[in-house]
Image: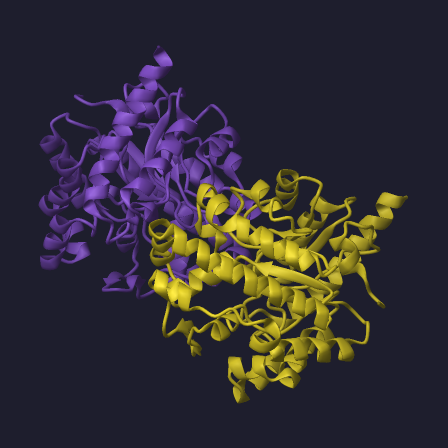
Chain colours: A yellow, B purple
């Protein structure tokens, strides 16, 4: 590996400069991405390994990033389970036959990843070949709770009334649903590692809609299972969700090697609550990148100052990069994180 | 005052049972409310003191609630400042001429509340007369940051790119905007207390989109100003926002007597971080009320157990009550909070 900063930081080993990658780094803010998407739907790109590979490489060729992340989405895993998923232009994902009853849960299939998502596994193999050891490749999946939320709500949701009501009113069917999701997700994560992913991120994007009490009982046990299965493949695991700052110690219970935190907390406060047993990823507000550069730099300085002298920080945004983000700011951000953190490193060694 | 539990809890004085009121308690989940709204628009109701009074009293007549809250909205204050506000059916608030430049900020007027919102002050006087000392009446306003967010975004927003970009790119105009909003909001809060409101809640609904660093610099100083002005009228002040669990100690800096917390944190954890100088309001997940009652009761028990033996807890939801909430569950919730907390109280005295 030419540049192994990211993997070293996942293991809380010292690095020469803080590694950086950005959630959704292959995305709509890049003209190269928009050019591909003008010709192909989201699902087409995900299902065509050559296109997924091309898009995966766009940001790592353009910017000083320390990891690639495979271009895919958390929801296609539901298709093979029996849900009719589509990405509706301008409205996001929509499921035509959302889960509404215990019988719907029992009808869900649990196909192995090699059958359900072979195109993403092929894309991982392709990207690894193209990267040729330059930087590591991250695979990912949605966590069981977040997938259950989409499967029951039928798409995004403001208040998540359906998923929470199902969870409370049908505890047995909920457990069976989460069991099935944990099985399929765990298998998918292991398959990604076997195909060449050198780290795995578990997105629990909706876990932050739960009270700590509900999280511990209804979501955490299944997150623990998928993290443990992923780690059995010998790669580090990152667990990420937003709006979870009221229950950070619970997130450590997932067993993940790295916890991703959103921008709503000072990163050293978050790390103090998480404790020394995990690495931390984050946490610049994605909207900060829309500001003039002279406002961005102090916000980056602040994060680096709060993590300086401590092994195990991976720089990232606190959530996915947004469409419309100025590309030049992304370029400068990656360079600046490396320069500033290396300088802080040298200062501390003097 | 026949029932002063709520005001005693605001001052962290002992009570016979935990007081309860619900954010948005006069709302669409009640048939009586929907009947009035079928005849009148949102702005009509707010601008007609008799209608606002009628709706304010609906939940306090129907349920065992320990406080009324005046029926109004945080946004009409912007109309007198020069913004064209409308409530678009099914889509929420929309501002026809959102703030887009420093010149727009300078064009904003700062009318006194008696001229800008006389109808709400009249409604407060009416409700006080009707309540006749039964329970206290709460007035409220949006906080400057949250109002600025609406004024710049022109309505609700997913990522708040416009307001944050304006805040970062135009720091001087931002300060002038927040000055104007703090002046108008402070005046409105004082006028509500003078009209008869016995407590005031400041809704900083959008503060949770900020990093702690931006909150401290760009929002907190103005929240402090309006809280101090409101307190100068001699009434307790509640400060509430969601997604703020990563910066609870900062919220204490607002100077508010009570901090409202959302359901994303255990209430005793929140109180420990806030410290002993404030009362705490919250924090049942509003969606829990859609569950079967046998799932609701243990969630209420959990909150009461975490606050038992400590003066200064006001029971509430962690956010506004949702349309579709079963009315019978609201009735049982209010009764159950009183019964259970009184029993815990007696046990602890034994």
Apparent side of residue B58 relative to residue A298 in the rendered image (left or right): left
Q: Residue at x 28, y 32 (%)?
A: B20
The answer to whether residue A8 is above or below residue A69 is above
A56 or B184: which is nearer to us? A56
The answer to whether residue B202 is above or below residue B343 is below
Apparent side of residue A332 relative to residue B263 in the rendered image (left or right): right
The answer to whether residue A89 is above or below residue B169 is below
Apparent side of residue A249 relative to residue A63 in the rendered image (left or right): left
| Residue B329 seen by the camera | yes
Count of number-bearing discs: 0
Asked where in the image residue B190 lies, by quadrant, the reply is: top left
Where, quadrant-wise, is the N terminus of chain B in this rendering?
Answer: top left
Asked where in the image residue A232 lies, by quadrant, the reply is: bottom right
| Residue A156 seen by the camera | no
> Outermost residue, bottom direction?
A39
B19 or B343: which is nearer to us? B343
Q: Residue at x 61, y 78 (%)?
A: A118
Give the percent coordinates (x, y) of residue B53.
13, 41
> Outermost residue, top direction?
B350
Apparent side of residue B315 relative to residue A235 in the rendered image (left or right): left
Give the percent coordinates (x, y) of residue B215.
52, 45
Give the percent coordinates (x, y) of residue B193.
25, 32
Asked where in the image residue A18 lies, by quadrant, the reply is: bottom right
The answer to whether residue A24 is above or below residue B145 is below
């Amino acid at each position: 590996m030419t540049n192994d900063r990211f993997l070293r930081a996942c293991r809380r080993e010292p690095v020469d400069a803080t590694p950086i990658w950005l959630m959704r780094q292959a995305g709509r803010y890049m003209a190269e991405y928009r050019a591909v998407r003008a010709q192909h739907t989201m699902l087409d790109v995900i299902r065509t390994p050559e296109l997924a590979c091309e898009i995966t490489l766009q940001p790592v060729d353009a910017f000083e990033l320390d990891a690639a992340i495979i271009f895919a989405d958390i929801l296609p895993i539901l298709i093979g389970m029996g849900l009719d998923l589509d990405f509706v232009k301008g409205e996001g994902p929509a499921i035509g036959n959302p889960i509404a009853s215990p019988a719907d849960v029992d009808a869900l299939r649990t196909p192995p990843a090699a059958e359900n998502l072979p195109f993403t596994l092929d894309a991982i193999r392709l990207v690894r070949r193209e990267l040729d050891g330059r930087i590591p490749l991250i695979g990912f999946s949605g966590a069981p709770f977040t997938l259950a939320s989409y499967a029951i709500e039928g798409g995004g949701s403001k208040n998540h009334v359906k998923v929470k009501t199902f969870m409370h009113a049908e505890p047995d069917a909920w457990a069976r649903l989460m069991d099935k999701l944990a099985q399929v997700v765990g298998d998918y994560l292991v398959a990604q590692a076997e195909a060449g992913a050198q780290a795995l991120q578990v997105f629990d994007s909706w876990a932050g809609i739960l009270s700590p009490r509900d999280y511990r009982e209804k979501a955490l046990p299944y997150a623990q299972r998928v993290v443990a299965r992923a780690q059995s493949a010998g790669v580090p695991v990152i667990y990420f969700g937003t709006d979870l700052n009221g229950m950070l110690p619970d997130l450590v219970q997932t067993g993940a090697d790295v916890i991703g935190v959103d921008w709503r907390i000072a990163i050293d406060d978050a790390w103090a609550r998480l404790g020394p047993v995990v690495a931390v990823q984050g946490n610049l507000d994605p909207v900060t990148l829309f500001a003039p550069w002279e406002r961005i730099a102090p916000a980056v300085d602040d994060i680096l100052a709060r993590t300086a002298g401590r092994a195990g920080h991976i720089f990232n945004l606190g959530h996915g990069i947004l469409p419309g983000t100025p590309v030049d700011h992304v370029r400068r951000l990656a360079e600046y994180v490396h320069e500033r953190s290396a300088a802080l490193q040298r200062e501390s060694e003097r």
